[in-house]
Each structure stands twice: as structure tokens, then as C-alpha cells.
């Protein structure tokens, strides 16, 4: 006859204790070391920010001089324009456009598009365009103005307003904090990372310092200062370090020069001091951060939710259950990452599809190899972020008696008491589904570090 004590069910299975265990000394020690490590890394990032802060004038990148004005196309006509030789005019398309900005607003400007200017699309009457004005006022018409781009300010502002509105409606106060973190992140990239790279600062170091600062701002501003945010940040920093190291190694092993794009080739001429390979690595690191913090925050939240739902779960069980969620998240995120890079390179893939080079040559060429390295390095860092962050969160939260609520990391909510289940007659195992107490909780599940 089996013993039916207060800690066992009628079937003899051991039940979890009535109250969650108190925080263990080793867990408290780990939390202390975790906080110290985050503070030290943050201080080093601030020192790097000060040391690498862009100073002095940047290099001349060869950007065409002259002002830019807005205009609306009013007339299109086929004409002939002077060619390279004065006595050999060539056919061209001449546009008339009404200026809507600049000192000559209200006047009509004429600009020509030669048949060899394939980068300029065919314009229609009513198109709102941006024209580049020649710095020389004596430039003859129709070459005083030249097409630069389309006006996109209004639709982009409407799209940004819609994005902000959706985030605020759904996220409310936390959505506002997330938007603040986004503004700070963009500010770090625009004010620090890009100017520092232009002034020949070490590209990898600049990218690492910039992404660390962005990680601190994005996680703490969006999710508050607290234990869960610190755990997510720690997992992000470890994964970011691995991603950076892997990007450096692979860029060297694959002999990526960074000269695959036309823009990089221009930079080699106009800013020859730039480390183009380092610039490529910096782009990989910055791009990986946007996915890493999403995964780490989700994994920490999953572990915390499991711990609050069942305070008796040990570190090993928390890790196992949260990893299952992480695998699903990684599977969908990696697919998204691959499709995002493939979509960005779709015109390039279409161009190569019409050629007669072997597929192996196409994939190992620098233009495609850069995207492959970028995609695979980012995916490896993403996958590693799941076990690292989940293990760290499980170890700490399994032996923490006050697990914070999601979105309220500044306050600690004590875990509720878990009442005993009433003693009932056991139901045949074939007639019921497995419950959370079907598997005995042995002592190994309560081990401090596993």
C-alpha cells in the first residue's frame, strides 16, 4: 500500500512543494556578478564612445555640389541635345517642370535626359521630382537642372505616422518607450557610427561600441530597468560578441574585399583611407543586432512566464520548456532573415540568371558571397542566442523567489502560493492526458546550476 502523504498524490507521485523555494545564495551571487558585468560592459562602451567620437572634418565623398529644388513635371517632348561633339547632336527627352521650392519657385525649369542615362526612369506629367541645380549659373539650358530623384516626403511621413499610431495603440506606454529606444538607436547610428566610420576610425570597434550602446538603449528603454531586461541584455551581448568574431573570421577566410558594390568602389576613390572590409563587417554586426534583441527578450519572457505559472519548476525544466518555444521562434526568424536578404538581392539574382556562368561561380562571386556570409553569420548568432539566453535565465529565475512581471521589471511580484490539489481517486492512465505532475520531480531538477 502506497503512502499518501501531504507531498504525494494518491498514485504515489511526488507533488511540488506548497511554497516556492527562497532565492538560493548561489543565484543571488550570480545576479550580483551579472549586474556587475553589465555595468562594466556599459562603462567600457561609454569610454569607447568618447574615444571614438568623430572629430574634425570628414572626407569629400565626391557628392555633386549644387542645390536641390522640388518641381512638378508639366511637359514631355522628344528633342535633340548637344552630344559629346558640338556638331553631332543626339536625341534626348526634354522635360519641363514647375519649380515649387528654392529662390526661383514659380518659374519653369527644363532638364534633359539622354538615352544612355538608364538610371533615370521615364517620367510622366504630374510626377513630383527633385532636381539638382548646377553650381554654375551660366550653365546653358537644358543642363542647368538635372533629375535627382522623386519626392517621397509626404507618403513616408504618412507611413511613419501610421507606424507610430499602431505601436501606441497596441503597446501603449511600453510602445512609447519602444519608440523612444528606436529614436535613440537611430541617433547613435547617424550621429556616432556613420561619422566615425567616415573619419577612418576602426570599423569593427566602432560597430561593436555602437551596437552595444544601441542594445542598452533599446532593451532598457523598451522593457524597463530590472532583472529580466538585464538577463536579455546579457544574452544579447554574448551573442553579439560571437557574431562579431565570426564575421571577422569569415570575412578573412573568404577574402571579402568590400568592393563588390558600386558605392564601395566610389568610396575607394573618394575616401581611400576607409577600411572597406571593416565597413562590411560593421554592416553585418549592426544588421544582426536587430534580430538578436528580439530573440533574447522573448526567451527571457518565456522563462519568466513558466516560472510564474509553476514555481516548482527547476532550472533544467525551465530550460527544456523554454527551448522548445525558442526553436519555433528561431525556425520562423531564420526563414524571415533568409527571405529578407534574398528579397534585397532579387534584382541581382535576376541579372545573374540570364548569364551563362555556372551556379557555383555565381554563388562564390563577391557580390553574392557577401550576402551569403551576412545571412549565415547573422543566423548563427541568432541560433546561439536562444540556448545562451535561456540557460542564463533558467539558472537565475529558477532560484529567485520574486520573479518580476513582464513589462514591469521595476517591481518584484512575489510568487503566489500553490495550493494542494484535493486527493482524488487515480484515473487510469489510458483514460486521461498527461498532466504537469505525471513526471516525478527528482532532486536533479532542483539542482542550482542545471
Image (tube, rainbow, N blue to C red):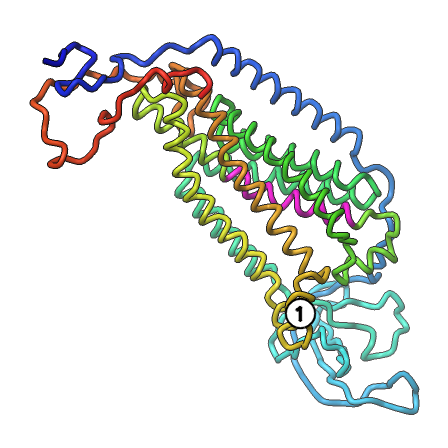
Q: How many numbered marks does the figure carry? A: 1
Residue tagged 1: 129
Figure check: 214 above or below 334: above
Q: Position of residue 20 (x, y in %)?
A: 32, 14
Residue 278: in magenta span? yes
- Name, please, the residue furthest toward the front: 1
Q: Position of residue 398 (x, y in %)?
A: 40, 19
Q: Position of residue 350 (x, y in %)?
A: 61, 72
Q: Residue at x 45, y 30 (%)?
A: 300
Q: Secondary structure at mark 1?
A: strand
Apparent side of residue 286 relative to residue 147 in the rendered image (left or right):
left
Q: Quadrant of residue 77?
A: bottom right
Mark 1 Cα-neighbour bin, 10 Å: few <14, some 14–19, many ≥20:
many
Apparent side of residue 442 relative to residue 273 in the rendered image (left or right):
left
- Name, please, the residue furthest toward the left: 425
Q: Position of residue 278 (x, y in %)?
A: 77, 45
Q: Nearer the viewer, residue 169 or 387?
A: 387
Figure check: 231 above or below 331: above
- Name, please, the residue furthest toward the top: 25
Q: Quadrant of residue 426?
A: top left
Residue 276: in magenta span? no
- The quadrant of the picture occupied by the N terminus is top left
Magenta-highlighted residues: 277-294
Apparent side of residue 418 relative to residue 177 in the rendered image (left or right):
left
Q: Nearer the viewer, residue 263 or 100?
A: 263
Q: Residue at x 26, y 26 (%)?
A: 439
- The quadrant of the picture occupied by the C terminus is top left
Q: Residue at x 28, y 12 (%)?
A: 19
Q: Residue at x 23, y 17 (%)?
A: 14
Figure check: 95 above or below 341: below
Q: Nearer the viewer, residue 264 or 382?
A: 382
Give the prevailing secondary structure in the magenta stretch.
helix
Amino acid at each position: 500500500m502506497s503512502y499518501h502523504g501531504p507531498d504525494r498524490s494518491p498514485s504515489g507521485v511526488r507533488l511540488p512543494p506548497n511554497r516556492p523555494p527562497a532565492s538560493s545564495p548561489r543565484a543571488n551571487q550570480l545576479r550580483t556578478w551579472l549586474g556587475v558585468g553589465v555595468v562594466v560592459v556599459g562603462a567600457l562602451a561609454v569610454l569607447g564612445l568618447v574615444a571614438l567620437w568623430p572629430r574634425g572634418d570628414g572626407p569629400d565623398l565626391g557628392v555633386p555640389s549644387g542645390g536641390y529644388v522640388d518641381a512638378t513635371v508639366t511637359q514631355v517632348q522628344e528633342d535633340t541635345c548637344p552630344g559629346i561633339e558640338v556638331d553631332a547632336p543626339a536625341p534626348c527627352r526634354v522635360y519641363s517642370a514647375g519649380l515649387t521650392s528654392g529662390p526661383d519657385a514659380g518659374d519653369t525649369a527644363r532638364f534633359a535626359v539622354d538615352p544612355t542615362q538608364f538610371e533615370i526612369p521615364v517620367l510622366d506629367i504630374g510626377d513630383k521630382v527633385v532636381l539638382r541645380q548646377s553650381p554654375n549659373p551660366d550653365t546653358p539650358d537644358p543642363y542647368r537642372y538635372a533629375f535627382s530623384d522623386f519626392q517621397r516626403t509626404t507618403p513616408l511621413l504618412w507611413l511613419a505616422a501610421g507606424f507610430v499610431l499602431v505601436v501606441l495603440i497596441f503597446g501603449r506606454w511600453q510602445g512609447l518607450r519602444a519608440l523612444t529606444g528606436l529614436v535613440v538607436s537611430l541617433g547613435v547610428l547617424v550621429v556616432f557610427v556613420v561619422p566615425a566610420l567616415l573619419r577612418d576610425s576602426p570599423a569593427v570597434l566602432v560597430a561593436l561600441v555602437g551596437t552595444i550602446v544601441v542594445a542598452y538603449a533599446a532593451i532598457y528603454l523598451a522593457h524597463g530597468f530590472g532583472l529580466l531586461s538585464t538577463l536579455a541584455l546579457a544574452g544579447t551581448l554574448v551573442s553579439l560578441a560571437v557574431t562579431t568574431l565570426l564575421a571577422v573570421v569569415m570575412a578573412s577566410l573568404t577574402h571579402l574585399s568590400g568592393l563588390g558594390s558600386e558605392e564601395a568602389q566610389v568610396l575607394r576613390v573618394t575616401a581611400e583611407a576607409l577600411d572597406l572590409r571593416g565597413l562590411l563587417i560593421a554592416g553585418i554586426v549592426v544588421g544582426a543586432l536587430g534580430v538578436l534583441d528580439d530573440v533574447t527578450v522573448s526567451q527571457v519572457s518565456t522563462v519568466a512566464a513558466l516560472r510564474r505559472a509553476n514555481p516548482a519548476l527547476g532550472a533544467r525544466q525551465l530550460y527544456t520548456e523554454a527551448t522548445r518555444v525558442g526553436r519555433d521562434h528561431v525556425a520562423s526568424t531564420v526563414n524571415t532573415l533568409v527571405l529578407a536578404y534574398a528579397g534585397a538581392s532579387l534584382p541581382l539574382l535576376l541579372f545573374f540568371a540570364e548569364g551563362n556562368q555556372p551556379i557555383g561561380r555565381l554563388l562564390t562571386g563577391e557580390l553574392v558571397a557577401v550576402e551569403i556570409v551576412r545571412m549565415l553569420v547573422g543566423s548563427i548568432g541568432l541560433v546561439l542566442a536562444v540556448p545562451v539566453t535561456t540557460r542564463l535565465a533558467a539558472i537565475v529565475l529558477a532560484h529567485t523567489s520574486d520573479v518580476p512581471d513582464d513589462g514591469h521589471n521595476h517591481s518584484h511580484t512575489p510568487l503566489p502560493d500553490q495550493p494542494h490539489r484535493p486527493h482524488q481517486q487515480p484515473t487510469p492512465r489510458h483514460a486521461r492526458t498527461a498532466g504537469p505532475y505525471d513526471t516525478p520531480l527528482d532532486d536533479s531538477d532542483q539542482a542550482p546550476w542545471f
